[in-house]
Amino acid sequence: MKATRIAAAGVAAASAVLVLSAPAFAHVSVQPEGEAAKGGYATVNFKVPNERDDASTTKLEVSFPADHPLASVMPQPIDGWSVKVTKSKLAKPLTLHGEKIDEAVSKVTWTATGKGVEPGFFQKFPLSIGALPEDTDELVFKALQTYDNKEVVRWIEPQKEGQEEPENPAPVLALSAASTDGHHGSSTAEDASDTSKSAADSSTEASSADSSDTTARVLGVVGIVVGVAGVAYGVLAGRRRTSA
């Protein structure tokens, strides 16, 4: 009986490890390739995991912050997805490379033309964006994730200082300080476009790294379960020999 209890406790502990590790990669997030320096351009990836076992993600809508508008937003083509960039008029025009800009990107929408993001997988959606604002340390986006069963998950809740992470946190892009040599990353939208062209290879490498990390976690948990089961079997076998 004690051996059985030990084995059961081991399985419960392993399950707890899985549960505790899940939130780390469960929500829509945004990360730059390299760094996103204030005043410059950057290539960023919106990472979308599928949280459902019986539905695929078929649409992603990302709304851009109105208080820090971005004049240049260029998506990278993704196989199996169409993309639409929506622009809106600005209440206060921007000056970009000596030219006045009276509109900025307000939303980017990706729609699956194939199976979308199936259960057990994630997808990265790359964008080249700029010029990044110089008067803030972060950009807060709002994302809507739609599944093929019509369910919509709204990743729009801001993180409040000193409080726990909300259930559906909005993607946040941290901005780094401009370099001391006076450059702000890529100096033109054309440079940003060149950076975007390499995003496919980088995205593939990042996906492989993420996949390897997840696999390592799973194998670690499996190892724990097997180890505990072995100990339990040894204890039980010892008790049987003692009884005999």
Image (tube, rainbow, N blue to C red):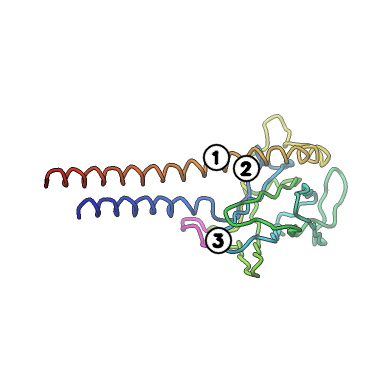
Name the residue tied to disc 1.
Answer: 212
Instruction: Residue at 75% x, 45% y: name it.
Output: 128
Which residue is more in the foreground, 123 or 190? Answer: 123
| Quadrant of image for the N terminus | bottom left
Which residue is more in the foreground, 91 or 43? Answer: 43
Is label 2 in a helix, a strand or a loop? helix
Few, some or many C-alpha atoms within 10 Å of disc 3 (few <14, some 14-19, many ≥20)? few
Instruction: Residue at 51% x, 43% y: name it.
Output: 215
Q: Is residue 181 left or right of residue 74?
A: left
Q: Is residue 238 left or right of residue 103?
A: left
Name the residue tied to disc 3.
Answer: 53
Q: Between tags 3 and 2, which lies in front?
A: 3
Q: Is residue 155 magenta?
A: no
Q: Magenta residues, as a range?
A: 160-168
Few, some or many C-alpha atoms within 10 Å of disc 1 (few <14, some 14-19, many ≥20)? few
Outermost residue, left side: 243
Name the residue tied to disc 2.
Answer: 207
Instruction: Residue at 29% x, 54% y: name it.
Output: 8
